[in-house]
Amino acid sequence: MIKSKTKEERQWLSDVAELGCICCRNMGLGASRAEIHHVRTGQGMAQRASHTEVLPLCPPHHRACYETGFHASPKSWQEIHGSEIELLEQTKQEVMELRACRV
Ligand SMILES: [Zn+2]
Ligand SMILES: [Zn+2]
């Protein structure tokens, strides 16, 4: 049963990436090619599998070494774009909508 879960997680990750960068879309810049950011907020209290706790971010919004990159300054980044938790909720909803369109 571990295998089917892995497959489900992979599908989730590919669906999230397909959405495009959540920051670019929220800023009205259109969907940029996204990579996966693993959310760390709240981990430790809940020991849940973290492969679904992910956000789609383009490289500049993810790991740019200047201030637009999440990992460069997580605090000011979240002041601009919203908290990881809020964005995570949005992402989950969007994946559901994406999947609904495929049926
Ligand atoms: Zn972006
Ligand atoms: Zn990241």
Image (cartoon, rainbow, N blue to C red):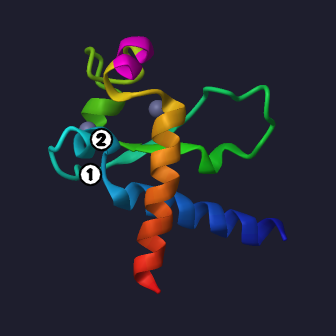
Residue 86 % position (x, y): 49, 36
Q: Is residue 75 above or below residue 88?
A: above
86 relative to 17 in the view: left or right:
right
Mark 2 lies on residue: 58
7 relative to 62 in the view: left or right:
right
Camera-side residue of 86 and 7:
86
Main SS of residues in magenta: helix
93 relative to 5 in the view: left or right:
left
Amino acid, disc 2? Cys
Q: Are marks 2 and 1 in contact (CB under 8 Å)?
A: yes
Amino acid, disc 1? Arg
Of the 4 image quadrants, the one containing the N terminus is bottom right
Find residue 23 and report its image quarter. Answer: top left
Q: Secondary structure at mark 1?
A: loop
Residue 77 lies in the magenta stretch = yes
Would you call the spot at circle 2 few (<14 residues within 10 Å), some (14-19), or many (20 or more)? many
Residue at point 49% right, 57% down? 93
Q: Is residue 71 above or below residue 18?
A: above
Residue at point 17% right, 51% down? 30
Camera-side residue of 90 and 44:
90
Camera-side residue of 15 and 100:
100
Find residue 58 and report its image quarter. Answer: top left
Q: Which residues are magenta?
A: 74-79
Residue 80 % position (x, y): 31, 21
Q: Is residue 64 above or below residue 22?
A: above
Q: Is mark 2 within 8 Å of ligand 1?
A: yes
Q: Is residue 70 above or below residue 59?
A: above
Residue 84 % position (x, y): 50, 31
Q: Is mark 1 within 8 Å of ligand 1?
A: no
Q: Which mark is residue 33?
A: 1
Sequence-wise, which precedes: disc 2 or disc 1? 1
Residue at point 45% right, 47% down? 90
